[in-house]
Image (cartoon, rainbow, N blue to C red):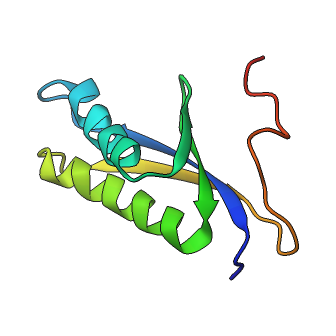
C-alpha cells in the first residue's frame, strides 16, 4: 500500500468473562512490546507506528495471542492513519494531553 510509516491503533476486547480479562489483553500488548515497533499504550487502545505490512502482522499476532491465552470470543477495533507521500509520526500528534 505504502512504504511510509503509518499509525495503527488497536483495541482488543475479550467478550468472555472466565479468567482474568486483563491477562488476555496483556498477552496482546506483550506481542506489541516484543515486535520492535514504536508504540504508545493508552487506557483505551495501543497505538503503533511503523510500516503498513509490519503493523498488520503485529495486529494479527496480537489477536493470535488472545486465542493462545484461551480467549474464544473477542472484538478487535483497528484505526489507521495513512499518508502515501509522507510518514505519519507520533511526534506530530500530542499524545500527552
18 is higher (above) or lower (below) than 70 = above
Question: Which corner quadrant holds the N terminus?
Answer: bottom right
Please give the name of the residue rendered at 83% of the width and 67% of the height, measured from the top-left corner: 83
34 is higher (above) or lower (below) than 22 = below
Q: Is residue 89 left or right of residue 85?
A: left
Q: Is residue 16 left or right of residue 62?
A: left
Please give the name of the residue rendered at 17% of the width and 24% of the height, measured from the top-left corner: 20
The x, y position of residue 89, in whole percent, is 76, 49
Question: Which corner quadrant holds the C terminus?
Answer: top right
Q: Residue furthest top?
A: 97
The foreground one among 33 and 82 is 33
Q: Residue furthest front?
A: 36
Quarter of the image for residue 13 reads: top left
The x, y position of residue 74, in whole percent, is 32, 47
The foreground one among 4 and 68 is 4
95 is higher (above) or lower (below) than 65 = above
The x, y position of residue 50, in whole percent, is 61, 59
Please give the name of the residue rendered at 53% of the width and 74% of the height, measured from the top-left corner: 53
Please give the name of the residue rendered at 39% of the width and 53% of the height, measured from the top-left corner: 35
The x, y position of residue 33, in whole percent, is 39, 41
Amino acid at each position: 500500500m505504502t512504504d511510509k510509516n503509518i499509525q495503527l491503533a488497536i483495541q482488543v476486547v475479550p467478550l468472555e468473562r472466565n479468567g482474568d480479562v486483563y491477562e488476555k489483553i496483556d498477552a496482546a500488548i506483550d506481542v506489541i512490546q516484543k515486535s520492535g515497533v514504536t508504540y504508545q499504550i493508552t487506557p483505551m487502545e495501543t497505538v503503533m507506528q511503523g510500516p503498513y505490512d509490519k503493523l498488520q502482522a503485529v495486529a494479527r499476532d496480537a489477536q493470535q495471542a488472545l486465542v493462545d491465552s484461551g480467549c474464544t470470543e473477542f472484538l478487535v477495533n483497528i484505526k489507521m492513519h495513512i499518508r502515501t507521500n509522507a510518514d505519519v509520526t507520533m511526534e506530530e500528534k500530542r499524545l500527552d494531553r
